Amino acid sequence: MENDFVDQVAISRSISHVPPAQFLLKIEAFSSLVENDVENYESLEFDAGGYKKLVVYPNGNKKKNVKDHISLYLAMVDTSSLGLGWEVYVIFRLFVLDQNKDEFLILQDAMGKERRFHVLKLEWGFDQFIPLEEFNDASNGYLVGDTCVFGAELSVKERNKCKGECLSMTKLTSASNYKHVWKIENFSKLEAKLYESEVFVAGDQKWRIDLPPKGIKSGTGSHISMYLELADLSTITRGFKIYVHFTLRIRNQVQSIHNDCTSNGFLVNDVCIVEAKVSVLGISDAL
């Protein structure tokens, strides 16, 4: 089955039971991308005649004024080794899985048109890959149980083993918003450049607060600096990504409206209280 239509260029839509040869991207809790206003999601890199990645715009590519569609693109990455003036010609197809029929809807430029990737054009694809109304209708099979699967296949001389990635988004609830409180005494006597809070767990990951009391970088000598840091990197693999909403603050202990730091309540009896609110939105890892 094949149906051609014209957008800005002729595009071919076809159906296949054969999965893409190079890459699959599975996204769980897809609606969380929309609800958290994630403009786009970039997949892991995969090697197909040079490193590529998929870029998904769950609400359409706003930079191109796309509405009511998902935008999907193939992008070049890690081009530093290609040399000055590099050009790569690619024939590609982008996929979305119909989970009800176990078959793929495929979009590609009609007549197998080559696309030229170069330093000023690192991305090609489809602004209007699929209408959101069609995609969100579970009876069509593209989004089932809030899970979907995209894919990419390139015409290259060497075919590599298909790699994949799974992005697991998390529905935000009150239980998923973790707050850690750190009480720091004798603040005016702190002499070290950096202090670390106790390790705490949020979203199955270990975190800590880093606090240079006299500031670092542009804040040196004029501000207190604070950072949220992953405390345990032993389980982090190449390509592992964590999406997090977080807030760092020093608590106002007296709720005063005065201007100086002490009367503001940030430092009372030489004690300050630091808080971190952490919500893990999703985790991505290789399949």
Image: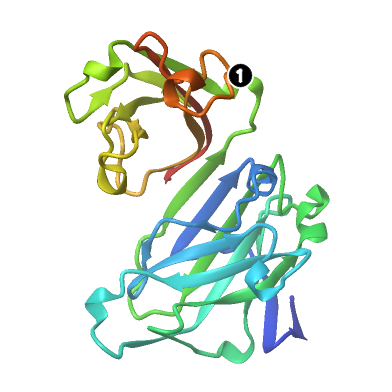
Query: At x 55% / y 49%, what residue is drawn?
Result: 26
Q: Could you tell me residue 88's position as x and y percent?
A: 38, 85
Q: Could you tell me residue 112's position as x and y percent?
A: 56, 88
* The N terminus - image quarter: bottom right
Q: In this view, does 225 lie above or below 257?
A: below
The front one of 111 and 59 is 59
Q: Could you tell me residue 233's position as x and y percent?
A: 27, 33
Q: Residue furthest left?
A: 192
The front one of 152 and 193 is 193
Q: Is residue 118 left or right of residue 35?
A: left
How are the residues colored?
rainbow
How many numbered circles does the render carry? Answer: 1
Quadrant in which residue 168 is drawn? top right
Query: At x 43% / y 19%, what residue is drawn?
Result: 262
Q: Is residue 273 visible?
A: yes
Q: Is residue 19 visible?
A: no
What residue is shown with label 1? 175
Query: At x 61% / y 19%, what residue is drawn?
Result: 175
* The C terminus - image quarter: top left
Q: Is residue 72 above or below residue 218?
A: below
Q: In this view, does 69 lie above or below 197?
A: below
Quadrant in which residue 10 is drawn? bottom right
Q: In this view, does 241 lie above or below 68?
A: above
Amino acid type, mark 1: Ala
Query: At x 40% / y 68%, what residue is drawn?
Result: 52
Q: What element carries label 1?
A: helix
Q: In this view, does 265 lie to the left or right of 185?
A: right
The front one of 232 and 261 is 261
The front one of 236 and 21 is 236
